[in-house]
Amino acid sequence: MKKKIGLIFLLIFACADEGVDGNVKDTNAKAPFNNIPFEVSGLIFSNDLKDTGDLNIIEFLYYYNGGGVAIGDINNDGLDDIYLTANQKPDKLYLNLGSLKFKDISEEAGISQNSSWSTGVTMSDVNNDGLLDIYVCKVGKYKTLNSSNELYINKGNNKFEEQGEKYGLNFSGFSTQASFFDYDNDGDMDMYLMNHSIHTVYSYANSNTRTTKDELSGDRFFENIIVNGKSKFVDVTEEANIYSSALGYGLALATSDVNNDGFMDIYVGNDFHENDYLYINNGDKTFKESSTEYFNHTTRFTMGVDIADINNNGKLDIYSLDMMPYDSEIFLKSGGEDSDKINQIKNSFGFQQQYARNHLQLNQGDYFVDAALITETHATDWSWSPLLLDYNNDGLNDIFVTNGIYKRPNDLDYIKYLSTVDFANYNETKQDSLELKLIDLMPTQNLPNKLFTNKGNLSFESVLVDSKNKGTYSNGAAYSDLDNDGDLDIVVNNINENVTLLENTSENNYIKVKLRKGENEINTNGSKVYVYAGNEVYFKEQISVKGYLSSSTNDVHFGLGQKEQVDSVKVVWLDGTKSLNTSIEINTRVTIEKENTKDNDYNSLSKTNYEEFAFRHFENVFLDYEQDALAPENLSKEGPSAVHADFNGDELEDLFIGGGRNQKPALFFMNKDGSFEKSITDVFNLDSKYEDTDAISLDIDSDGDLDIYALSGGNDYPSGHPLLEDRVYINDGKGNFSKLESRMIRTNGSSVSSYDFDNDGLLDLFIGNRSVPGAYGLAPQSYILKNKGNNIFEIYAKARFGMITDSKWADLNNDGLVELVLAGDWMPITIMSFTDDGKFIDKTRDFGMGETNGMWNSIEIMDLNNDGNLDIIGGNVGLNFKWKASKERPVIMYLDDFDENEKLDQLIFYDFFGTYVPFASKDKLVEQMPYLRKKYTDYNSFVNVSGIGDLTEKAEDEIINIKYIYELRSMLYLNDGFTFSPLPLPKQAQLSTLEDMIIDNGNLIFTGNHKSYVTELGESSSNSGGILNFSDIDNITYESLKLPKAIRGRRIIKLKENQYLIISNNGRSYKTKQQKEGLRNE
Amino acid sequence: MNRFKHYIYILSIVFAITSCSKPVEPIEISPEVFHASVDKVMEIQIHDIFSPPVASRVFVYPNIAAYEILAQKTQEMESLEGKIKELSAIPLPDSSMNINLELAAIIAHMELSKSLIFSEEKMEVLQDSLYADWKEKNEPEFNSAKTYAFEVINHIKQWMDNDNYNQTRTMPKFTVDTDDPSRWQPTPPSYMDGIEPHWNKIRTFVLDSAAQFKPNKHPEFSLEEGSKFHEELMDVYDVSMEITKKGDDSEEIKIAQFWDCNPFVSVTRGHFMFATKKISPGAHWIGIVKIASRNTNSNAAQTVNAYAKTSIAIADAFISCWDEKYRSNLIRPETLINQHLDPDWLPILQTPPFPEYTSGHSVVSGAASTALTAIFGDNFAFDDDTEVPYGLPVRSFKSFNLAAEEAAVSRLYGGIHYRAAIDEGLIQGRNIGNFVVNNLKMNFE
């Protein structure tokens, strides 16, 4: 009890402390960093920029991309030293004197003190002599700039000699960053050189130019060849299959063994429309660019990247940065996601799906899934350097992000209004002075850097970096325990402001590992270090190039929290040999030397386990957003339907699968050996024109066999259209079907289910409908049909429940009368009780489900805790979604014809980091509702729109319909016989939408993903399917179904014990491979 | 010395205003006030970024309102009632009030314009200074004119609001069928949706229907060498290569730039983006109306007549042209040349975001020049300084028709239209112009 009070007190105290600096909506929690002034540290360095006629943001698109930081111990004195790069000033090298005091030794060390344009910097022992060398990238050939990349060879005694030419690394072009690593496991360091492009994107049409070599902009790969004991770098770009074209706007670089096979891979983050590249090392001196195989989507304007294990599962995850704002005002007036049309155009030109927000790519073994939205680490504004480091030494990697752009060229007012009025004749004359004026007009806004504390279980807390919370324009950054006090300090390179030195004052336990490969070799890049402490395993890979333009310490740092000891430290060296050390003292720096053990310690991360099934669903092309421009999702891509039942009386369960519009429904008979054989059925072939959304089997004509009720749907025709008509197929008992000639319901159907609610021995039907085509949001009529026998159904009841997606029948309160349970968009899980006077009564509130409004896709009903009451599992959108919702802060949709043009408008508001914002952009809104053009003649007037009152004069009670979403999580609702109490499904099951599920052996087997959201929301594709085990209801466990990435699972069917068939929307279908023994827990 | 004189002059005005308590002098409206209002509308259109068809709508209704008011007074001007679709007679002025109809006409013009543009405060800058001035001169006269102007505005607005403009705002967007190689595709760099796909549903003014002057079909799409279409495609490419070689000082490039009339050309440099904005094709011809009116010393009524007739011809021209554009849905030369001939080719002008056939500038220029010729006569030579504020030089023309022909062919030089769209567009526009001229009596001529 006492403890509880303490906790509450703490929370209150924390709240009272709110708003240290005012305008930033971070939580008030602060990290243990002290910002050490340069007067104290001696780190006197500022990357000052001065516009010149030749070099400014208009003439050079990467003018504000800033400088980098490299940290490493150049004199092996146990203190990491610092190299800082500048664009228009000389670089500087600072010697660490201890206690966070630094001395500028640039000149005596031999660092060139000219003012060529430096970008990225890397410290690495290039020549294997035990001394860290320094490689500096340059914008070397542009207008007045003329220089080459520099390689400073460490001669000892803090002296360096520039030997770029001698080593063959004096490249001159548009270099961003280099990484040294051993690509062929021969013990020496090879080099990837990432260059950027400087030309303007005019069109997307030329993705084939990816293979066209560009001398200045194309990336390069160099192999280190030792001749007579001397290193020489040879350009093997082409041989290694590295793209080297001007299409690559390379800004982000990290090299890491992401698939844990003992060969280093490369992540290159490209700005603009070009894909990011993931080069998987083939192990034979070649790479295979595998971005589309490994990622569902990536950052669009990728600017920085780091690779580390973020969820302590022993696999390397990737965090890449983009430019999505988190401040609602900046968000509403900045260019953001592409329109659906532009997105479609880019995809058609062969570019991968990309979103302009940060991505946290979780390693699944065979591929990655993005978890930035569920962790809320997706928006850090115009961001440069991500560092995944355990700043608070609690054993979990946290996230540090630098951000800021000195001038905001994506300000929409600037693009549309400010920049144009006086400068229409820009192309004609006086460019220089006009440019200066244009730049002057460009908005400028600095922001504090961001820090996210990892709370475990995919949950992060945004905290202030330091007490000053000062805005900066920050670019490169690197970390190291600079004062050797056992925690990681951070150095940040800023534009027009002194470097930031953040002293970390964490007090938790730690262990620091220095790796060596024998007397003189310190090239340990790619080694994996595992620290075992009790039940925990902490895993880190030793890589130093990370973040942006920067390289961090070579020491491998582990936070241990309050743990007083570790059991052992294991190092798996790149070649697979390992060193195990069991007597490790904590709170020290230990050096581990490579041993020449032989055993290879690499396990394949590959986890998928499936085979393809011979049905592929095809969707017709219909672009809902061209009809319902303000709707958040497209409803024309539903289905397929599937029925698993014995149609030919051989006691083997056959399959009926209904296709998309213009695809024939398919009938498969099951053979004795469990395989399926497709049957050619004329009656189905004639019905390809329907879009099948759901189907069930039941004996309609009372002849003892199973007939099919096939539900037609589609958002592409108005209700009442013949192409929306449902069909009944009558079985002759041998699996031969004929179509019942009868007028059926013609609506956009979504769910059909059957139950004999009136106990007359005949199965009755529920027909649930998805939408009123052309009027997203309105609830269509759904029907309960009573089976009168002799193939006759009559409408027993109808109601506008909502945008139905699923329906189930069950007696939830054990009163012998059935309940109809309904799921859908913008509605609660709705419970209709059948009463003894023959009515269906809405009992949603009585059952405690009144405030469950969600975007429900599916429901399943089962007694999960064996208390004799049926529980409900609801499949929802999940948490990995741009919208957030709660009872207090719901997503709200206002439906009305606000502009009186006889077309329904959907005005949606949602909570954007604490402020309500309209979902539709200003451009979209004024296009749909022209009267708003007058009210919001520019974007600045639009940034404070936060509610319906800003968009219409109509009072809320005059609006036709207002809908809410309170719940986006997939949920379990436990039934105590009278009411339901909510319990969220585990985080892993919230990574994507949950589209269909079945109960098998007390487990819930589900399939997920949904790609029909508009681009602004983005596709949900982070979980193709999984198994939830409910044997301990307080500790529901999760296991992956091991399906291919990003399939759009719509139907899941149990084929036999532990084997499932997943039928996808607009894609292939898969069977999981049968597991020998039940569940295999990870 | 001069400047000093000027200073005294201003002083004396101020003095006059402040010293007399209620000066009563009649308010005289010169044609320059109408020019000022039209100029203001043009300036705001540029700021607010009106697409060419919508810009034509912004011009035409205020001009009609002003015309109808003046027609109450001027014998030579006959009301457009019954000649323009669904336009009924405006309310009559209270004859006992002796309303200053010129004043009412300019007030109606400004107020209706203000309701059609977005940035109202920019219109108010002009209005406020004029209203203050008129009020000082003769407040009762101003008030009664304003009251009447608003009666007319309400009448015109009711008619205007039924032109289907609002309904067309939310009609489905134009769906691009990417499988059909002849069909229009969005073009770089902005890949904008096709604008105003439903403009043919806007009520016409004089035309019976949007399709009344449906042009001949364009040459059948074919990439076969020797086909007419292929020949025209190659012509665009060859002409562009040839004049690019000649350089920026070539007559062709000067012509292309002079008649660009693209309201929003987006320029991108990395993350840095801005737009060069110009007046629309319709606005350019409205500018020529001003030049012609001034050169002929037209009075206010003549000026309003010229604006009204020309803007009606232009508005109908856009409806007719857009009807054809989204009927034929023809692909732009830029898309085909990039796909099949030269992936790096750029047209000299930025391709505007709608289908190719027919050329909007050709149709509009054909219609406007025909109306102007009817009003001011053929062989009316003029110096066209309309584009000077946008950094372009003055060009001189011997007649409206020759100017229209140059405007039309500028689209070939600019690399954004095939020859057929220009030739057939000009014919289409002249047909519309003649129809408008024949149906609206032009008594001043």
Image (cartoon, helix red, strand yellow):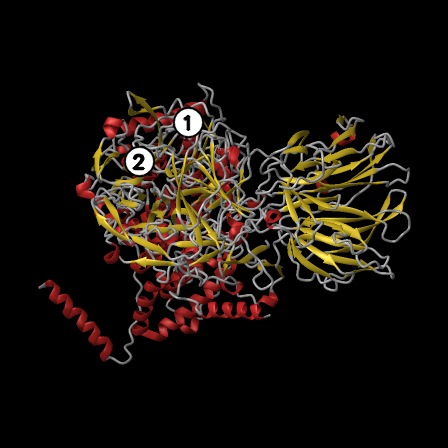
Q: Is residue A1027 left or right of residue A167?
A: right
Give the structural element (helix, strand or loop) at label 1: loop
Q: Name the outermost residue toward the front.
A: A583
Inspect this view and state whether residue B419 appears: yes
Q: Amino acid at mark 2?
A: Ser
Both on one chain, marks 2 and 1? yes
Tag 1: residue type?
Asn
Provide the residue designation for mark 1: A185
In the image, B191 versus B386, the foreground residue is B191
User: Relative to the observer, which residue lies in front, A922 or A224?
Assistant: A224
Circle number at residue A175: 2
Q: Residue at x 57, y 68 (%)?
A: A4
Q: Nearer the viewer, residue A546 or A196?
A: A546
- Rendered location of residue A741, percent (x, y): 83, 38
Q: Name the image quarter holding the N terminus of chain A.
A: bottom right
Specify whether residue B330 is in view: no
Q: Residues within 10 Å of mark 2 (few under 14, many from 20)?
A: many
What is the C-alpha distance between the residues marked 2 and 1? 26 Å
Q: Nearer the viewer, mark 2 or mark 1?
A: 1
Is residue B316 shown above or below A260? Answer: below
